[in-house]
Amino acid sequence: MSYNTIKELLSMAEERNVLLSQIVLETEMTLLEVSKEHIYNEMENRYNVMKSSAKNALFEKRKTAGGLIEGITKTHYDYTQKNDTISGNFINMVMSRALSCSEVNASMGKICAAPTAGSCGIIPAVIISMEEALGLSKKESIEGLLCASGIGAVITKNATVSGAEGGCQAECGVAAAMAAAAAVQMKGGTPAQSVEAVSIALMNVMGLVCDPVAGLVQVPCAQRNASQAVNAVISADMALAGMKSIIPADEIIEAMYKVGKMLPMELKETAKGGIANTATGKVIFRDIFGK
Amino acid sequence: MNISIFDVTGPVMIGPSSSHTAGAAKLGRIARLIAEKPFKKVSFGLHGSFADTYKGHGTDIALVAGALGIYEYDERLSKAFEIAKEQGIEYEFYKIELDDMHENSVKITFEFENGEKCDIFGSSIGGGQIKIVKINEFDTEFNATAPTIIINQYDKKGVISHISRVLFDYNINIAVMKLSRTAKGKNACTVIETDSSISKEVVDELRLIENIISVQAINI
């Protein structure tokens, strides 16, 4: 017994009245022929890398090729620390952590792809901030990661998580959907609410293009990590409030995939469209690559 | 579900790009294992997107790091140029057009102390995954996700049956086997992916087979 769709994953959890992460865990144990402890340890290793990358740019800027996002994390973290923001401390810490992962990644630091390197800040930002804000255990965070990863595996199987194939919606958008499912579980919501959060997060990001300035994983990637981490949090809240997505998650995933295929190649990681192809974007490209 | 959650949440890697950084480092690292011998110089012919955008993604640093044996997740990766200098290893980059190859491809040439060279062609195919497509004059294709044996032999009858006999004796199951040759009766190359790791004893035994020129094992 296994799942290939979100619907199947959800019904397996509901039949046994267990968390989504439990079904994901058992499926992985069968797939890799390993123990539960092995999977928890392996995921904890990844979580530790995520925690470092979510912290390492908060206090000092990191040197990056082209320097487009150097220091943006510290600036945002310092602003957050003043406790005088519009969207509050939690949301601003989520953004600070997402930015940190992006800045560390751009500076050739160590990150955990989730699901890609370009979108590596979203899941850590949400899960670490949830753990901190709700006073959760590390085990609950790792189960959040399992929940997110199970959703990501279904999307990888039935659609894509590649920016070159599906645009930013497939990278940062999918990361937001994964993080939203985890956030609902960590807040004590039901598996069905996690699935609604996946749908809502993906609806919110449908069609987002991949248009990196100068082809670097910096602008708008860092900003999209911050905003999609926030998308995950608000999608989780909408689902927890009882919102229904109307369209089932598997159909939204299929729609996202089809939209990705419809996007012209200029808008899929080639740096030939979107903000990469603006007058200033082209100047930056020439300055860095000398042509 | 046949996709591991660790392929979704992962790999742990040095940024910024799974294809242009992690994949490049893995290409360098696997190429080093194929070349096997200590080398004094390594050259990288960059093709397609590798040639156009390598500077911004540290592809050059990652390739050198891999050639030095540094893993994709090792934080020493970003210091590869300095480490190469310390070890007295020369490196260079140039642009090359490789016909019909993936956008992110590289020709890696190792130069050994005795003046001999080894050319390895490979591509970074996304998500940190790679494929090796050519070793010297031999076309091949493997992803280095399973233990792999690379054998150079003379194209003579019976060599393959001797190889499979050795693997059988050591209880190694063959997952994939690919054979190519330059011309009938000339040199041939066999690439075997296996389900279990390949010990030194297996490699030594394979080297004893008549008409086999060289054997390398890559244990993942």
Image (cartoon, rainbow, N blue to C red):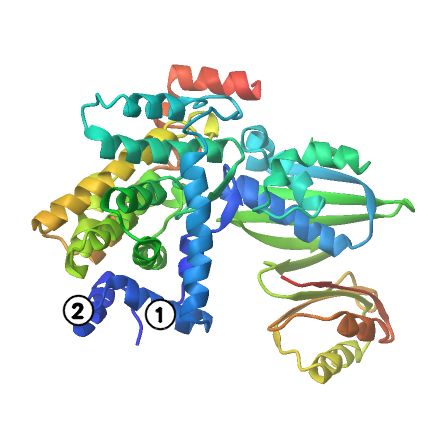
Residue A27 disc label: 1
Q: Residue at x 40, y 38 (%)?
A: A54
Residue B140 disc label: none
The residue closer to the viewer here, A211 or A97, is A97
Chain of residue at mark 2:
A
Q: Say what secondary structure mark 2 lies in.
A: helix
In the rendered image, the quadrant that contains the N terminus of chain B is bottom left
Residue A6 rendering spot, x and y as whole percentages: 24, 61
Residue A216 rendering spot, x and y as whole percentages: 47, 29
Q: Residues within 10 Å of mark 1 (few under 14, many from 20)?
A: many
Q: The disc labelled 1 sits on which kind of residue?
A: Thr
Kindly tell me whether residue B213 is visible in this rendering.
yes
**Relative to A238, is B110 on the left or the right?**
right
Judging by the rendered image, the residue that carries numbered circle 2 is A14
Question: Looking at the rendering, which quadrant does residue B212 occupy?
Answer: bottom right
Whichever of callouts 1 and 2 sits on the residue coming sooner in the sequence is 2
Q: Is residue B164 above or below residue B186?
A: below
Q: Say what secondary structure mark 1 lies in.
A: helix
Chain of residue at mark 1:
A
Residue B29 rendering spot, x and y as whole percentages: 67, 49
